[in-house]
Image (spheres, rainbow, N blue to C red):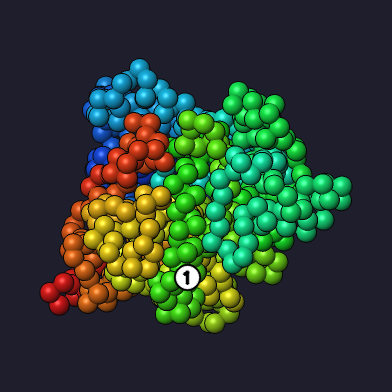
Amino acid sequence: MIGERPLELTEVLWEEGCEARTIAARATLQSLLNSFLRETGLGDWHESDEGWMLQLPLVNQHGTVIVPVKYKSPTGRHLFQFPLQWKGSEDLGAVTEDELAIAERLVRELGQRVQVDASGRTEELLQRIRESCERIEQFVSARDGDHEQLYGYDGDFLTAEQSLLFGHLLHPAPKSREGVPDNAQSVYSPELKGQFQLHYFRAHRSIVREDSALDRMTATEWIKSELRDGPQTEPDFISAYTGLDDYTLIPLHPLQARDMLRKPSVLKLIGEGLLQDLGARGRFYSATSSFRTVYHPESPWMAKGSVPVKITNSLRVNKFKELERGVEVARLMNTRIGEVSSRYPAFSIVKDPAYVSIALEGEEESGFEVVLRENPFQGDRALQAALVASLIQDPLPGSESRLSRIVRRLAEREDRTTEAVSLDWFRLYLEMSLKPMLWLYFTYGIALEAHQQNSVVQLREGYPNRFYYRDNQGYYFCRSMSERLKQELPDLGVKSQTFCDDAVADERFRYYLVFNHLFGLINGFGTAGLVDERLLLRELRSVLAGFLPMNREPSTFLQSLLAEEKLPCKANLLTRLYDMDELVGSLENQSVYVLVDNPLVLEVPEDVGRLDS
């Protein structure tokens, strides 16, 4: 019954006292199996008095995976009761199998179904899954005593950024990190509360590339002022290197600095005196959920650099067009488009208003590209700010999700049901997140890549009070609106390459904002037993239908969500199997999309927001 405390997810995935290895293996299979079901459409669901049971035939392996289901979700991320069983074609009955053994069966089955190079890509994916599982085990073991920091009612920006022990809940290898030395995990991993100094280089202006949309402040001066103001910077260093001169200071992630110092072209610049290696300096920054974006609660900026690390699907390097895009968007928000902040005062875009790099002959990116992101979460302004993914992540044994803890405390304090509180919470959230993003899209053709990790909500007394969108990579400008946008900035898109066909913008906006973010949030309410997901889907559909009068051609964003039973959705498992780097290549070919069920049509009563109503 909604409002009563359900059997918690921790009791579903693992029992009290489970070892970190078991927790990690079950979390890994939970994500992989949900991805497999979504992307293949396979599986026979059966309901009985005891609940749901899933039978998943793997025809190429001549057997069936038998999956007891604890929670069947309308939005497609289900909870399974472990352990699972395997029934072969021989008449021997079902036997319990290890989680990673079943994971291997799923990957091999998928590889055969899509006929990838079985000797290469399937094995590579299996290796990444095992590596991700090992990382999760390490994080779970290290953070087992940190339940209050991970899921407490109170919290701040950094504790939330460091709390994603399991990562993306619909990705086969969410904690795969190729390129981080084992002995450096504790230094650079946000899950392990990593802290480190940035590694500074001093570059002569003749080789520097920089830009800034800040008012009377260059990127160079912003970096130098941060070092001057930082109490950990040595006085001799301040006097020698942070004054007004012909040099720029470039803060690199230490892993990137190590690689740069191996490049012959960089060593040549150092030999010529155009570049100096100043080493680790200044404040100790903390790794955030993006791994390569670093944060200090007293710094005016966060630095987002490149790292020689492949995380999930992509090598995490800054493209120069992305640096240009950050500055361009900062300037764009100073035009009439910034009206979104007055129309929706609780909505903010975290700007990336400056960047710095050096030029290397014959290379578009040198490896020194650093984005300087404004830091709105300084001091007390960091309190109660959390990325959405941290609110709904699966908890460790003996805990509940942070969202569950918040809503249950509010329900107790207000003497209301969790259903009533959840509905009010979700309505407030849609007002400050979905509505302004829809307004930007239909008024100016600007789509935001607002997935769970790019979306930060600040709470006040438990309820949403402010929403922040962040990410200099995550903008799509609709080509049909180019003339209107260029009235604000005539050179818009020339350097940033941000314009795309409306169909591409529709597809990405629909996946990141709706499928990943809002369906994921709704699922977080549902898996915690706070409210029937269908009630929140109904609210979401109603808000979407309310924007129909603003609809513009050729966008089919609203019509597709309100009328189509199946829609394209990003396939993280297939994208990883094909080893596609989502930061490389054209927008149209960065990842795999497959048709999946649309719960806004299939799970919502017919009288809510129908196109013909």
Question: Who's the residue at 60% across and 23% down the image?
Answer: 264
What amino acid is found at the position of numbered circle 1 in the picture?
A: Asn
Question: Quick check: 576 left or right of 252?
Answer: left
Q: Is residue 520 above or below residue 80?
A: below
Instruction: Write the residue at 82% across / 56% down.
Output: 231
Most foreground residue, 542 or 374 = 374
Left or right of residue 403, residue 122 in this image: left
Which residue in the structure is indicated by mark 1? 334
In the image, 383: left or right of 522? right
Residue drawn at (50%, 43%) of the image: 318
The answer to which quarter of the image holds residue 343 is bottom left
Q: Can residue 188 be seen by looking at this rendering? A: no
- Quick one: 151 or 414, which is closer to the camera? 151
Please tell me which residue lies in front, 414 or 251: 251
In the displayed structure, would residue 564 be above or below residue 305? below
Residue displayed at 70% across by 26% down: 271
- Rendered view: 181 above or below 588: above
Residue 375: give x, y in percent of width and height.
62, 61
Picture quarter containing residue 607?
bottom left
